[in-house]
Image: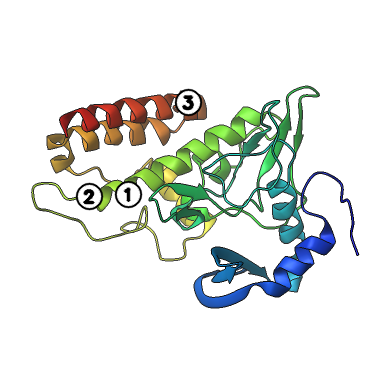
Amino acid sequence: MTTSGSGSGLPLLVQRTIARTIVLQEIVGKGRFGEVWRGKWCGEDVAVKIFSSRDERSWFREAEIYQTVMLRHENILGFIAADNKGKPAIAHRDLKSKNILVKRNESCAIADLGLAVKHDSVLNTIDIPQNPRVGTRRYMAPEILDDVMNMNIFESFKRADMYSLGLVYWEIARRCSVGGITEEYQLPYYDVVPSDPSIEDMRRVVCEQKLRPNIPNQWQSCEALRVLGRVMRECWHGSGAARLTALRVKKTLSQLCAQEDGKA
């Protein structure tokens, strides 16, 4: 039996066939909405995300985003369709370290697009998922915590993602060795909120007290961490409009990598 499918992804029959031939090996992550397993398929290592049936809506949304026509990027996990006419604009809405997977070649892939929004630049419309799930409170931007974000402007979602990205950079940088000192791993705001903070916990710290993760003085002695520290501060600015864009961050880090490679 064969099916031509819609052209936007693998035909349903093929997807089901693949699912039946995957061998689950070990669980590598677990959250409120499902589990992620390491598996084998046709001799390849694969990540398998298993949703509970009550979270079917989140599964549908993530599958839809991954199969979006023209969405293809080496640092986004598990997409299928490709074209050469450009890429859709997408904001993640739940960026955090647990949603960034490290590949064998040490490059990264963004996972969990269940909350992502798509922007149609031609029609100027925003496709927001009808999903009761919200993002991870610890990584929420100030405007989301204060409930003042303009949901009608796509740029608002991008700016909120940049705030979250700044926190991820802090997590990474904290594990770097400077002068023989390596800090233990901690989540952002570990020292000022509970392990499972409420919206009110985060709003008080981020919006009222305007606190941000501490940037150690020793980072100033390392050019790479000094630059990254500046990037973090500009990413987690209280005003979304004042935050760095993804393109600006990419250019800054590319220049930094080139400088570091030149020293090697």
Q: Distance of mark 1 from mark 2, alpha carbons? A: 7 Å
Mark 3 = which residue?
A: 247
Determine if residue 8 is in view.
Answer: yes
Q: Do callouts 1 and 2 mark residues in contact (Cβ within 8 Å)?
A: yes
How far apart are labels 3 and 2 at the CA level? 24 Å
**Percent from the top left, x then y, of residue 219?**
18, 40
For badge 3, the amino acid type reads: Leu
Residue 176's label in the rendered image is 2
Q: How many marks?
A: 3
Q: Depth check: 258 or 149 in front?
A: 258
Left or right? Give the position of 245 relative to 167. Answer: right
Nearer the observer, 21 or 191? 21
Residue nearer the viewer, 252 or 107? 107
Q: Are marks 3 and 2 in contact (CB under 8 Å)?
A: no
Question: What's the residue at 79%, 61% (across, down)?
Answer: 14
Query: Would residue 198 be found to the left or right of residue 81 on screen?
Result: left
| Local secondary structure at mark 1 | helix
Q: Could you say which quadrant of the image residue 233 lies in? A: top left
Q: In terms of sequence position, does the residue under pointer 3 or pointer 2 come before the other? A: 2
Judge left or right: residue 226 versus residue 1.
Answer: left
Amino acid type assigned to the residue bearing label 1 in the image: Ile
Number of other residues with Cα within 10 Å of mark 2, as a class: few under 14, some 14 to 19, many 20 or more: some
**Kind of residue sitting beneath label 2:** Cys
From mark 1 to mark 3, how far is it between C-alphas?
A: 20 Å
The residue labelled by disc 1 is 172
Q: Secondary structure at mark 2?
A: loop
Can you name the residue that lies furthest to the top here? Answer: 122
Q: In front: 182, or 258?
A: 258
Q: Position of residue 171 (x, y in %)?
A: 34, 51
Name the side, left or right, on which 29 lies relative to 167.
Answer: right
Residue at 47% across / 61% down in the picture? 197
